[in-house]
Image: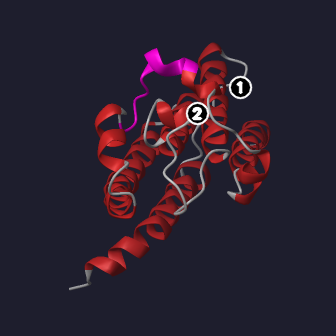
Amino acid sequence: MLDRQFWKSARVPTARLFIVAVVLYSFVWQRIEVPPLTSALSLAGIALAVLGVLVRGLAAGYLHKNQELATDGIYALARHPLYLGSSLIALGLMLVIRDPVVAGALVAVMVITYLPTIASEEAKMAHRFPEAWPGYRDSTPRLLPRIDRAGRIARGGWDAAQWRRNTEYNAPLAVLLALVALQLYRLFV
């Protein structure tokens, strides 16, 4: 039987490989129909994906991984805004694509990768920041933001250089490439 550490390190690459397989199955083999990107549901999906990119971007500008506990800015609303942003992006793409196989695959990958990763990250934070973590954990929801704290987003110092160091420019590029690929697929298949 494979040990726990192997599954911990293999979870994300396996999930990515699974998504590639589902995309190939759905778009190459099944040739699913993609609705127009200008339809109301597609535009709502694009708006959700853009919101997800913004949430991730806000988070990445505050996050100094393994150096300090991020509690300011968007981290005052939710403990895991990067995962919240990624979930919004995935939900948005599900609305654009509207295929149950693709949607099911995205949900499965998010559950299989995010839940254990969040648990692992929270255990690390509890160990690394034993004084600050319990109060932060108890006062800040895990994923769904506390809207009553929205004014705290401006608190703290969002840093564009930190956003770049965290390579968060990949999220808007990935969403843009996905939308362009969907449009090209729609036009040529």
Mark 2 surroundings: few (<14), some (14-19) or many (≥20) residues within 10 A: many
Residue 12 image offset from top left, x and y in percent: 46, 65
User: Which corner quadrant holds the N terminus?
Assistant: bottom left
When asked about the image quadrant of residue 128, the answer is bottom left
| Residue situated in front as seen by the camera: 111 or 35 | 111
* Residue ID at (55%, 24%): 152
Question: Exactly how many numbered labels are in the figure?
Answer: 2
Closer mark to the observer between disc 2 and disc 1: 2
- Foreground residue, 42 or 70? 70
Seen in the image, is 76 located left or right of residue 187?
left
Q: Confirm or deny contact between disc 2 and disc 1 (CB under 8 A).
A: no
Nearest the eye: 119 or 48:
119
**Residue at coordinates 57% horizontally, 58% vertically from top-left?**
24
Secondary-structure class at tag 1: loop
Q: Amino acid at mark 2?
A: Gly
- Element carrying mark 2: helix
Mark before the other along the chain sequence, 2 or 1: 1
Q: Position of residue 15 (x, y in %)?
A: 45, 62
In the image, is residue 152 above or below residue 119? Answer: above
Kindly identify the amino acid type of the residue bearing the numbered disc 1: Leu
Magenta residues?
A: 142-151
Residue 147 highlighted magenta (yes or no): yes
Q: Name the side, left or right, on which 69 lies relative to 61.
A: left
Q: Is residue 70 magenta?
A: no
Compared with residue 65, is residue 34 higher up or lower down, i.e. above or below? above
Q: Residues within 10 Å of mark 1 (few under 14, many from 20)?
A: some
Q: Where is residue 16 drawn, in percent x and y?
A: 52, 62
Say which quadrant the C terminus sits in.
top right
Residue denoted by label 1: 37
Q: Which residue is mark 2?
A: 73
In the rendered view, how is the structure colored?
secondary structure
